[in-house]
C-alpha cells in the first residue's frame, strides 16, 4: 500500500508539479509571489481546500450524478473556501488583506478543479488525500521560492524584513513575475532531464474537462 501511495505523494514536487509542469494556477502564482508572507498564506489556504475537496469528492464520487459533477465540485470547493476565508479573516487578518480577491478565487483555481475532476473522481479517498498533499506541497514550494526571489531582489526584504538596500524593483512588477516564472519553468525542465511536457496548460492536466466547462481560471 505504501509503495502504491508514495508516487501519488511525490509526483507533485517535480514530475507533475501543477505550476511548473502542468502550468496551472498561474494567475495566483504571478499575483501573490511578490511577498513570502502572502505566498505562504495562499499556499496553506489552497492546500487545505485541495485536501478536503479531494477527500469529499472522492467519498461522494459514486453519488454525484455525472451530468452535474462540475457544479457539484464547485459547490463543495466554494463551501470549503468560505470556511477558510472566514478563519483567515478572523485569526490572520494581515494575510487576508495581503491575499485580497485571490483568496475567494481559490474556488475556481484550475489546480483544485483539475484534481477533483481528473483524480478524486476516479480514486479512493486515501489516494486522493495523498494526491492533494503532494500537489499542495509542490504548489507551496514553487510559490514560496518565487516569492522569496522576487521579494528579496525586487523589494530588498524577506517576509517583510529589510535586507537589501538597492533592490531591482522591476522584479515585483508583472514583467518581473513572468521573468522569474519562466526561469522557474526552465529550471524544472532541467531537473526533469531537459524534457518539457509536449502539452502545456489544461491540455496536460488529467482534469482538463473541468477547464473546458469555462469555469476554471
Image (cartoon, rainbow, N blue to C red):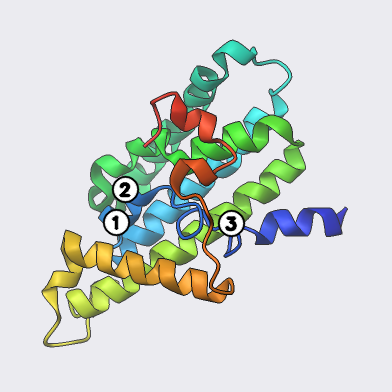
The picture places residue 168, in percent across and down from the top left corner, at: 14, 79
In this rendering, which labeled residue sits more in front, label 1 or label 3? 3
Q: Secondary structure at mark 2?
A: helix
* Image quarter of the C terminus: top left
Q: Secondary structure at mark 1?
A: helix
Residue at image position (62%, 56%) is 134
For disc 1, the marked residue is 30
The picture places residue 188, in percent across and down from the top left corner, at: 49, 70
Residue 24, relative to residue 17: is it above or below? Answer: above
Real-space Cα separation, disc 3 to disc 2, in angstroms: 18 Å
Q: Give the mark nearer the N terminus: 1 vs 3.
A: 3
Residue at image position (52%, 22%) is 70
Q: Is residue 184 left or right of residue 170?
A: right
The picture places residue 143, in percent across and down from the top left corner, at: 40, 62
Depth check: give the residue in front, 152 or 197: 197
For disc 3, the marked residue is 16
For disc 2, the marked residue is 27
**Contact check, label 2 and label 1, Cβ < 8 Å:** yes
Amino acid at each position: 500500500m505504501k509503495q502504491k501511495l508514495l508516487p501519488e505523494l511525490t509526483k507533485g514536487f517535480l514530475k507533475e508539479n501543477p505550476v511548473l509542469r502542468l502550468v496551472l494556477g498561474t494567475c495566483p502564482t504571478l499575483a501573490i509571489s511578490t511577498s513570502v508572507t502572502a505566498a505562504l498564506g495562499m499556499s496553506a489556504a489552497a492546500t487545505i481546500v485541495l485536501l478536503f475537496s479531494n477527500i469529499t469528492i472522492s467519498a461522494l464520487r459514486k453519488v454525484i450524478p455525472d451530468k452535474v459533477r462540475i457544479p457539484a465540485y464547485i459547490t463543495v470547493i466554494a463551501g470549503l473556501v468560505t470556511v477558510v476565508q472566514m478563519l483567515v479573516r478572523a485569526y490572520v487578518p494581515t494575510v487576508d488583506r495581503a491575499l485580497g480577491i485571490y483568496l475567494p478565487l481559490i474556488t475556481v483555481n484550475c489546480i483544485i478543479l483539475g484534481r477533483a475532476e481528473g483524480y478524486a473522481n476516479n480514486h479512493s479517498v486515501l489516494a486522493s488525500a495523498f494526491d492533494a498533499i503532494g500537489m499542495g506541497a509542490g504548489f507551496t514550494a514553487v510559490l514560496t521560492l518565487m516569492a522569496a526571489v522576487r521579494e528579496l531582489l525586487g523589494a530588498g526584504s524577506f517576509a517583510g524584513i529589510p535586507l537589501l538596500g538597492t533592490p531591482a524593483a522591476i522584479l515585483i512588477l508583472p514583467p518581473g513575475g513572468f521573468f522569474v516564472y519562466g526561469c522557474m519553468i526552465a529550471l524544472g525542465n532541467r531537473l526533469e532531464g531537459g524534457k518539457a511536457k509536449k502539452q502545456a496548460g489544461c491540455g496536460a492536466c488529467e482534469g482538463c474537462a473541468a477547464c473546458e466547462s469555462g469555469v476554471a481560471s
